[in-house]
Image (tube, rainbow, N blue to C red):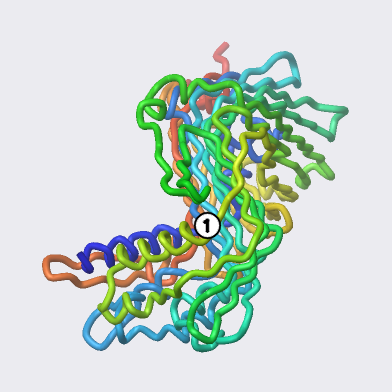
Amino acid sequence: MFKKSRYLLIIFLGLILQDAASQNSQVLYYMNLPQNHLLNPALRPSNSFYLGLPALTGINVNINNNFVNFSDVFMKGKDSIITILHPDYNVDNFIKKLKESNFITPEVNIQLFSLGFNAGKDLYIFLDVTDRVNGNFVLPLDFFKLALKGNEEFLGKTIDLSTLDAKATYYREFGLGFSKNIGSNLRIGAKAKLLFGLADFSIVNRSLGLTVNNDYTYSLNADLSANLSGPVKVHFNSKNQPDSIKIDDKVLKSTEFFLNTQNRGFGLDLGAVYKIADRIQVSASITDLSFIRWKKDVTNLKAESQFFFRGFNISDVIAGTMTIDSLAQIMLDSLKNSFTFTDNYKAYTTYMPFGFSAGASFNLTKSISLGVLSHTIFFGKQIREALTMSANLNLGNAFSTSLSYTAENNRYDNLGAGLAFRAGFFQFYFIADRIPVTWNKIVTNNASIPLPYSWNTINLRLGMNLVFGNKVKRKSDKPMLPEQK
């Protein structure tokens, strides 16, 4: 059982290491692809018409963290690679790399349908239907210290956990937008979005303090609430304590869940591109100014009191005297038996993280350009910035490629690449930001598993479009002969 739990924890840590903090594919921005209007609605591809089919047109996966990479979890031991749960692992070195606020931000976007076409000389119209899942989980530094090193350092002290946060949202987005030239140098774009929320979990943390008492018990002063919407039911015991949380599998697998339109919201994207000179242009955009009002299957939980519970320590798991399963059960039982919630079923509103992009490009030739792009994401009070420089080649929509370098999350070794090519009416593309450059191996009894060594970031986007127009013209094969008299 211990081995299984250990491997599950390692897999989880490995997943959160695949970091894409920007929630944006900077490589895509300067490629000639229909999807670039997702980053700036004023950008438009050179084809006159494109069509995207369900799930085939675009899949984008991001998993973000700002505090750890593979080399922190999988490191070289005396004879092989050891993990964070190994007794020889240096926990102090790991803690030194942590931030005051450590975040994990996963995101998955699947385009269900997309369409774009010319509607006049300089007007372009596009439509997108996308399923989106995003989350934001923030863990304070002292949370890790307490979990990994125990509570000796905190005896008689109160730990401030007011920055602890957790949010996860699944919703469907219908977007209709346009881009148009205003004069000879300026192009503007906008997209209005209708949102339908499918499931949500969010914590509102107004105050949270954890005191380690001298008898090694914990007292928690909390003023927080949690909101849920979806096929989830919280059951309470006679003391009004949460006894169990159950997911309704029948509803989850039914069309009632996936076609729910009761949780509605709205959003807006705005963008502009301005040509300064023949070879220089600048651009800017604001995306995902969005909110959702949750009304269906809502549960509100509120904790506003002081609670006491028994301590726990992950060092017991590292020493092998306790399994991850047992530790998790102790934690859940302690919290469940200590918290007294007041619950109601009132509608609530959530706001999506929004982004701001600003870029500039210089055309070396008609097909080759150099670009720089700054992208900032706003998660409430948290601000995350990424800066990308790229070299781009666009031969109409027959062939497009880009190479990029990104600085973000205090890392300066993030490389990216994109490739798109056309085969008849089909346009295929694959984009990867933050490509790992150094690799290591985990040696097991049966195999050697390669893993990126210092990788903490990835952003993958791939898909296929049906495109029409803007074929690269071939030169005539007829020889140029002088006219004979």
- Crowdedness near tag 1: few (<14), some (14–19) or many (≥20) residues, C-alpha within 10 Å: many
- Judged left or right of residue 443, residue 158 is right
Nearer to the camera, 121 or 322: 322
- Count of numbered circles on the image: 1
Q: Is residue 117 above or below residue 151?
A: above
Taking the spot 42% from the left edge, 67% from the top edge, the residue there is 437
- Location of residue 73 in the rendering, given as x and y in whole percent from the top left corner: 38, 73
Picture coordinates of residue 403 (x, y %)?
A: 53, 54
| Residue 47 image offset from top left, x and y in percent | 59, 24
Q: Work out whether residue 19 can be spotted.
A: yes
Indicate the quadrant containing the N terminus: top left, top right, bottom left or bottom right.
Answer: bottom left
Query: Dividing the picture into quarters, in which one does residue 197 lie?
Result: top right
Residue lying farthest to the front in this orientation? 238
Q: Quadrant of residue 384?
A: bottom right
Residue appearing at x 75%, y 21% in the figure: 122
| Front in this rendered view, residue 219 or 94 | 219
Is 23 in front, or is 475? 23
Q: Residue at x 70, y 54 (%)?
A: 376
Above or below, comparing residue 19 to residue 316 in the picture: above
**Helix, strand or loop under label 1:** strand
Above or below, 405 relative to 308: above
Q: Which residue is mark 1?
A: 64
Tell me the amino acid under the disc marked 1: Asn
Q: Position of residue 216 (x, y in %)?
A: 48, 82
Q: In the depicted view, which residue is nearer to us: 357 or 350?
A: 350
Is 223 positioned to the left or the right of 248 in the image?
right
